[in-house]
């Protein structure tokens, strides 16, 4: 792992569970956590509204970005690409 | 019936230009979107698109198929974008200062959280919101941006993303996590500002 990726996020929480949730959040969202830890985090979220909001907002962030990437390719970009390649590749 | 990438690649290698056009048609949209998200400039994105597919055509004779064609293609596309970014005068810092995007304690008070997720889609995906999302993406260091785009926007697996970028799965996961936290922080800041006056949650749990 690279040097800049080793650092644990600075998150001086009073409660250990919040910190753990933050560190394991992506694994939780991606379904990569072991079931026991997953259940622990869900139990924690049921009791900690800020953590629940944090999880909700990060999930929504991901889905908004996913949705925002679905515009079609402009027709003229498609045509120019094919023209460009035809011209360039003749000499390949 | 649609031919597989593998068959089309073999046909291109034997001199079938139409097979190459089929591959271009299949992936041009995804490559363009990747470039547009990476570079945030339609002209640069179009240049990267053209350069990528030209590299593909020129590189195909030496492509041995050890990785999937799509993985190799996106590796070329990402590298083309990263090269363009490196040539730009202004480049975001390489490190992602994550603490800037986490709830923070100010003047001894616990952070306030707003759950903006139940707002109507038309507000969350308005033209202005989309613009803010793309601005947020641009603020990420390019290496983190590339991971987020491939993994969360284009739906690649961790392994495919790692292979496309030439990094380990552990590095993909780490960068993805930081990118997601940073983007959440930036979007939350924006949506919270837009919805000022709404009730906020304040508890002792999530503090920074």
Image: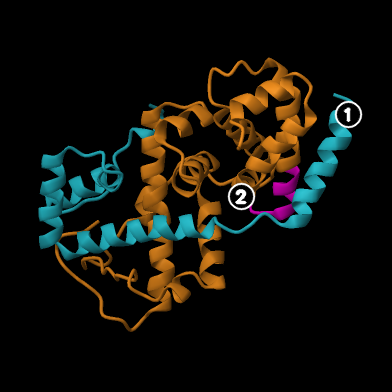
Q: Position of residue B47 (x, y in %)?
A: 75, 44
Q: Are marks 2 and 1 on the same chain?
A: no
Tell me which segment is drawn in magenta. Answer: B40-47
Quick one: which residue is furthest to the front in this view? Answer: B1
SS for callout 2: helix
Q: Which chain is orange?
A: B
Q: Is residue B177 above or below residue B137?
A: above
Query: Which residue is identified by label 2?
Result: B33
Q: Is A86 left or right of B56, judged from the image as shown?
A: right
Residue in view at x 36 percent, y 30 percent: B170
Q: Nearer the viewer, mark 2 or mark 1?
A: 1
Q: Residues within 10 Å of mark 1 (few under 14, many from 20)?
A: few
Quarter holding the N terminus of chain B? top right
Q: Position of residue B43 (x, y in %)?
A: 75, 52
Give the camera-side residue of B151 and B136: B151
Q: Position of residue B179 (x, y in %)?
A: 42, 47
Give the camera-side residue of B89 and B60: B60
Q: CA distance from mark 2 to mark 1?
A: 27 Å
The quarter of the displayed image where residue A92 is located: top right
SS for callout 1: helix
Q: Is B94 left or right of B104, judged from the image as shown?
A: right
Whether residue B43 is in magenta: the answer is yes
Residue in view at x 37 percent, y 36 percent: B173
Viewer can see residue B85: no
Q: Which chain is cyan?
A: A
Give the camera-side residue of B121 and A24: B121
């Amino acid at each position: 792992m690279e040097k800049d990726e080793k650092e644990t996020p600075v998150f001086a929480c009073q409660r250990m569970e919040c910190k753990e949730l933050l560190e394991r959040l992506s694994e939780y969202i991606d379904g990569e956590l072991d079931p026991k830890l997953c259940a622990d985090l869900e139990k924690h979220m049921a009791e900690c509204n800020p953590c629940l909001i944090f999880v909700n907002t990060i999930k929504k962030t991901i889905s908004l970005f996913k949705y925002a990437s679905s515009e079609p390719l402009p027709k003229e970009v498609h045509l120019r690409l094919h023209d460009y390649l035809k011209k360039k590749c003749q000499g390949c | 019936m649609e031919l597989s990438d593998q068959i089309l690649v073999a046909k291109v290698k034997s001199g079938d230009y139409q097979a190459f056009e089929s591959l271009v048609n299949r992936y041009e949209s995804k490559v363009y979107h990747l470039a547009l998200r990476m570079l945030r400039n339609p002209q640069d994105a179009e240049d990267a698109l053209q350069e990528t597919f030209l590299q593909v055509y020129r590189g195909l004779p030496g492509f041995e198929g050890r990785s999937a064609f799509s993985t190799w293609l996106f590796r070329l596309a990402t590298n083309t974008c990263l090269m363009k970014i490196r040539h730009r005068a202004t480049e975001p810092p390489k490190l992602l200062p994550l603490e800037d995007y986490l709830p923070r304690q100010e003047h001894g008070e616990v952070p306030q959280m707003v759950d903006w997720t139940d707002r109507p889609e038309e507000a969350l995906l308005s033209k202005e919101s989309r613009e803010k999302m793309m601005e947020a993406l641009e603020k990420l260091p390019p290496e983190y941006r590339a991971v987020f785009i491939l993994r969360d926007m284009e739906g690649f697996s961790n392994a495919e993303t790692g292979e496309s970028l030439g990094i380990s799965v552990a590095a993909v996961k780490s960068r993805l996590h930081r990118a997601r936290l940073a983007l959440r922080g930036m979007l939350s800041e924006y949506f919270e500002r837009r919805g000022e006056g709404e009730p906020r949650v304040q508890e002792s749990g999530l503090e920074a």
